[in-house]
Image (cartoon, rainbow, N blue to C red):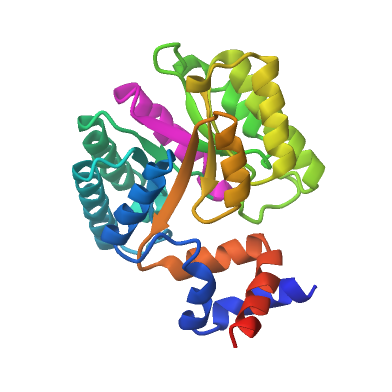
Amino acid sequence: MFNKMIAALLPYMPKKLVWIFSKEYIAGETLAEAIANAKKLNNEGIMTTLDVLGEFITTLEEAEENKQEYLEVIEEAEKAKINGNYSLKPTFFGLLIDREVAFQHIREVVAKAASYDNFVRIDMEDSPCTDMEIEMYRKLKEEFPANVGLVVQSYLKRTHADIEGLKDIHTEKNPVNLRVCKGIYVEPAEIAFKKYEEVNEHFLGDIEYMFQEGMYPGIATHDKPVVEGALSLIEKHKVSKEKYEFQMLYGVTPALRKSIMDKGHRMRVYVPFGKQWFGYSTRRLKENPKMAGVIIKALFKKG
C-alpha cells in the first residue's frame, strides 16, 4: 500500500528527484547519449532497439517534428554502426489526430530503415489504438515485408485471435515478427485478463502458437517464471536460436538478462531516450510500485 501511494505521488515530485531513479532506466536525454549507451550494450553482445520517448501529441506540427527526429536517429545510429533497430509509437506521429498523416510519417521512417536493410517495430498502445495499429502493420508489411514488426499484449483477451489473424501475411521467408509483452495500460476487465497467473498463461500460449506457426517472437519479459516457461517451449519445439529473441528494458533485471544470455539465447534491450523521459519514468513506477519503495530507501541512504 505504501509503495502504491509513493508511486502515485512521484509524478508530482520535482523532476530532479525523479531523475535519481530514472537515470538507471533512461539511456539519456540526447541522441548522442543513447548511441553511446547502445554501443556499450552492443559490446556486451546485446542487440538494441532505439526509441524516442513521447506519445499522444496534440498537433500535426509535432508529428512532423517527431518524424524528422526519427529520420535523424536512424541516420546517426547507422553511421555509428549500432547493432539494433528502432521502435516507435503511432500516437507520437499523430495517429489520434489524422490516421493517414500518421501512416505516411511512419511509412517514411520505415522506408528510411529499410534503405539500410534495417527494421522498425510499431509499439502497441492502449485498446482504442489496437485495430488501427494492427491495420498499419499489415499495410506496411505488404510494402516492406522484412522491415517492420508489431507489439502485442498478452493481457488483452483478443490477442491470441489477433495473432492468428496475421497468418495470411506470414511467410517462411518474411515471418510475422511480434514483440510479445504482458501490457502496461490500465484496461477494463471486460477486455483484459487481470490475474497474474492468467496473464502469464496467455503470454506463454501466444509464444507457443507463434513457434508452432514459424512466426518470430520477441519474448519481452522480466518475469522469471515466464522466462523459464519460454525456455521450456523453445526446448519442446526445438526452435533454432535465429527464430526468436528475448527482449528487456534498459536497466531492468540485468542479472536475469545475463543468465538468459549465458545459456546462448539472443537478447535485445529497449533503449528509451529523449527529453520526455519524465512521463515514461512515472508510468513505469505505476506499473511496478515495488520500485517506488526501493527508490525511497535509496534516497534515504544517500541522504
Q: Is residue 120 above or below residue 176?
A: below
Image point (69%, 22%), residue name: 233
- Is any part of residue 289 visible from this angle? no
- x%, y% of residue 175? 45, 19
- x%, y% of residue 92? 37, 55
Q: Is residue 115 magenta?
A: no
131, 4: nearer the viewer: 4
User: Residue 301 appears in which quarter of the rendering?
Assistant: bottom right
Quadrant where the N terminus is found in the figure:
bottom right
Q: Main secondary structure of the magenta part?
A: helix
Image point (63%, 74%), residue name: 295
Image point (36%, 45%), residue name: 99
Q: Is residue 144 magenta?
A: yes
Left or right placement of residue 74 versus residue 134 in this view: left
270, 55: nearer the viewer: 270
Quadrant where the C terminus is found in the figure:
bottom right
- x%, y% of residue 186? 65, 56
Left or right placement of residue 97 versus residue 151 in this view: left
User: Residue 152 appears in which quarter of the rendering?
Assistant: top right
Q: Which residues are magenta?
A: 126-150
Image point (80%, 47%), residue name: 195
Q: Is residue 165 above or below residue 221?
A: above
Q: Is residue 162 above or below residue 195?
A: above
286, 240: nearer the viewer: 240
Left or right placement of residue 177 versus residue 260 in this view: left
- Which residue extends farthest top? 172
